[in-house]
Amino acid sequence: MLRSTRTVVLFGIAVQIAAFMRTAIIAATLGASLDVDAYNLGLIAPSFISTVIGSWLQVSFIGRYTSLITTGEVRLAAAYRVRMLVLMLVVALAFAGLCFLLPGQIMAIFLPNAQPATVAAAAAALRVSGLILIPIILGDFIALILNSHGRFLAAALAPLINALVSVLGLLLWPSSDLSALVWTLLLGSLAQCFAVAIALSRMRLAFPTETSAAKGEVRTTLMLALPLLPAMMLANSAAAIIQFRAAELGEGAVAIYGYASRLHGALAQILVIGLSTVLLPHFAALWSRGENAEVTILFRRLARCTIPVVGYLTAGIYLMGETATKILFERGAFDAQHSQQVSWLWVLLSLSLFPAAFGTFIAKFCQAVRDAGSILVSGAISFAVCVAVTWVGASLGSLSIVSAAVVASAAIVSCFWLAWLGRRIPVVPILSDIVIASLRIGFILLPAVAVERWASLYTIGWSSMPDLLVRGSLYSITVMTLLIATRSDRWFLARRPGETT
């Protein structure tokens, strides 16, 4: 599992680098303009739909499909994947058609208080961006099949191809405007779908025309949609709610939040998504074999490994986030004021890293055991918290409070998942590991923060890049030195509870 995780994480890092190139181009050419607001708003519906469907498939399809493969029911697995592939194609065409035919009506529903120009521009973006649902839904479904067969490399490579194609397209596009943003995004999505389709064809899996044997499996999968789709819609609505509320705060607010969310999302993708991609089929296999003790060991390792990484990143963002933002974005239409606004929101969002990460890991276990009811409850909690916090933020005209909904939602939902986990495996050792890991990394970070603050006194007036390199290097070297000197690295990386080597 660790080898697969490394593969997914490394490709995830490469994807984020390529995506940052695209974001930097957008920031330099369009800044925090109406076009960027419209682009972000126009992507809400396609992103929301594809995420909800993808989450439903992870719960309802991958657990059962992995189980069929594990137990050797090859013919039933083949029929099952064919029927589900056809179903996904129909669903993708239906939603893409709605976005293409009714973009104005859809945007008017969710932006009743926004300026007419914002609504019109967002509708124009949605008409094209909705088309990405076809390659994205199909590509994500094929990637799930690849992951279930252990082909993590091919599934992880496809998003990188997507990012590179979209960046190259944006660089070569004749003009930098809203049209260029959405059409190059579509080109990248098509490239990603083709990449996973080619990888699937090389596996030489059977795709029979006679699939009646899988009728029951598909029916069960669809029945799980009754509690799961509402749950996924609620759980994944936070990003949409925040951006819609931000649109009420005036031009540029959506763009500012979008840039901060891009920075935060890059770390979250590397920390959470790459690992959880591997965890889901692994949890499904452990659960199907009844290896509950191994599940407990795995969660303890996840806690010990996640805490130091999150602590290091969060403190680093607080100390050097503004400097990093300047290097990444501050050029052309993106000025110093934008850097300050984005960096502050980035610090705020980083507080959600650990609760979001560990809550997601537990949710993957829940998906593996196909507990749809608990997923619905977690989604309802996330939705309620997000609505309440963003309403307060919009009422006060504060983008910071609106953005803080991410932190509040992640924290409360994580508490729910810990309570859920406690009913299935011993959770006290896991909580103990979280507390001890927090104390260990806290004592290590204090001297590192002091060293970085001392270095910052001598780099005043330097240009941003050498300033960040010196401060970041001293901060990182101090953390690594103390980890090794105190032998905390052995505790954090211990394979089993109680091991220190």
Image (cartoon, helix red, strand yellow):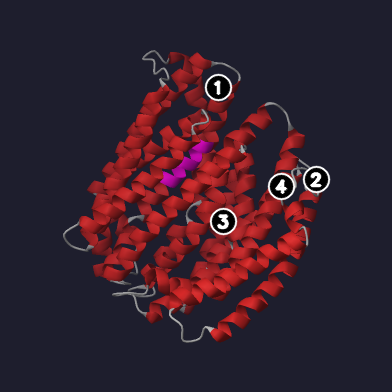
The residue that label 1 is drawn on is 69
Residue 232 visible here: yes
Please provide percent x and percent y for residue 386.
53, 62
Vertical comparison of 321 with 436: above or below: below
The residue that label 2 is drawn on is 497
In the image shown, does 235 or 328 lie closer to the viewer? 328
Q: Amino acid at mark 3?
A: Ser
Q: Amino acid at mark 2?
A: Pro
Please provide percent x and percent y for residue 97.
26, 42
Q: CA distance from mark 4 to mark 3?
A: 26 Å
Sooner in the amino-acid sequence: mark 4 or mark 3: 4
Nearer the observer: mark 4 or 3; the answer is 4
Identify the disc placed on residue 382. Answer: 3
**Magenta includes 56?**
yes
- Please identify the dominant SS of the magenta region: helix
Region rendered in magenta: 50-58
Sooner in the amino-acid sequence: mark 4 or mark 2: 4
Sooner in the amino-acid sequence: mark 1 or mark 4: 1
Vertical comparison of 289 with 228: above or below: above
